[in-house]
Amino acid sequence: MATRALSVPTSWDEVTPAWMTAALADDVPGAEVDTVTVTTRDDGTNRRARLSLTYRTGAGPQTVFVKAADPDHKELIRLTSGMFHEPRLFNAVKSGVPLPLEHPHVYAAGIDEDVYDFILVMEDLDGRGADPRDATRPMTPEQAAAGARGLARMHGRFWGERLDAEENLTWLEPFLPWDGMEIAPLPEALKRLGDNAPDEVMALTIESLIEQIWKPYIRSLTASPQTLLHGDPHIGNTYVVPAGDVGFLDWQVARRGNWSLDLGYFLQGALTIEDRRRHEADILRQYRDALALPEAELPPMEEIWLRYRASVAHGLTLWLCTASAGELWQRPDIAIALAQRYSAAFADLESAAAIAAIGR
């Protein structure tokens, strides 16, 4: 398809009207872009920009959102996620692979493996009144349930042999542990958790967190039913549309593995601690119902509850390590809020025992 052959500009100045015309051709055939203007940009782990467009002929989106690799962070992306997972996924979607949950529409995805680079041209979600969320603006239980049902629709669609049958997803890698987090100064994060931090968390060392909690759980993801995972569905990668549905952004960590990583990582960080305690059991039942699998394939509620309890390992580890780094990777208020939520869940759900149980 045209999207697979799309060239990858090295700067926003190279996103010319002719280039943008080619990028939009699948969705707005016959439209010819006249001008491209950078209206906002945010260069972090990836380069991001909102572009305003005018047209010489035809009509198309007035603004688009463009995402590309940042040269200074390519090695970090190589270590923790995967440079080409997101563009490969959306090229698969454009080839007909369904992605049955709310997500941004992607007009084009280009990959340049020779220089280890990519570009995505997506809809500007502001045009649909989307409300991006982060840890300082948690979801209501109803919104979190909508997000869990969306994840369930995707997981059920690609459950087990269904994922293996998708020829356009054969590139999908298993979710495996990565190295590097063991250098995090964990005591710095623990000091920031506050007086209500659980004793079970305060007793952790970076070695016990990585080797006894995180890695055993992550290894379990490939020793159990497999599906397509978003891989990084924390609340900062979500948005809410006016009708109330929850969408998921930033699919760079798309993987194959056990459903529990997506569900736990999303739910335990999206809700306040009290709302999670009150509503998580009901939302897990809604998740199971929304899988829409034959009865013989549906995991029993006991298994869902066990693996959900174990899944705290991922959010706890990532956000304690993030909080330990000060302002290096994330705003401290966001990192600490999430570290507190996953810490409370770790104690409430007796996650260490659940991890031991799934590892037997």
Image: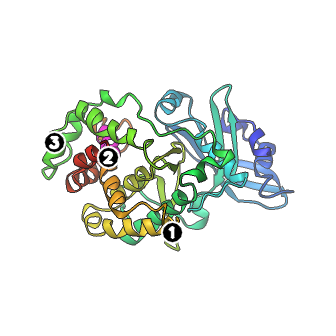
Q: Is residue 225 left or right of residue 68?
A: left
Residue farthest along the bottom direction in this orientation: 243
Q: Residue 170 is drawn in which quadrant?
A: top right
Query: What label sits on residue 358 in the rendered view?
Result: 2
Secondary structure beneath disc 3? helix
Name the element at disc 1: loop
Q: Which residues are magenta?
A: 313-321
Residue at point 47%, 30% (across, down): 79
Residue lying at 80% horizontally and 49% vertically, measured from the top left: 21
207 versus 264 height, above or below: above
Residue under label 3: 202
> With respect to residue 108, does 58 lie above or below?
below
Queried whether the magenta region covers residue 298, the answer comes back as no
Q: Quadrant of the C terminus?
A: top left
Task: For residue 136, say whether it is visible.
Answer: no
10 Å neighbourhood of mark 1: few (<14), some, or many (≥20)?
some
Between label 1 and label 2, give the one nearer the viewer: 2
Question: Which residue has dot 1 on it?
Answer: 245
Q: CA distance from mark 1 to mark 2?
A: 32 Å
- Which percent across, then down, holds residue 85? 59, 40
Which residue type does callout 1 highlight? Asp
- Mark 3 and mark 1 in contact? Answer it, CB < 8 Å: no
> Along the line of sight, which residue is nearer the eye, 18 or 212?
212
**The N terminus sits in image quarter:** top right
Looking at the picture, which amino acid does disc 2 mark? Ile
Q: Residues within 10 Å of mark 2 (few under 14, many from 20)?
A: some
Q: Which amino acid lies under the numbered mark 3 shown in the image of this protein?
A: Met
**Of the numbered discs in the image, which one, if any, rests on residue 157?**
none
The disc, 1 or 2, on the residue closer to the chain's N-terminal end is 1
Specify whether residue 239 is in view: yes
The question of residue 318 being in magenta is answered with: yes
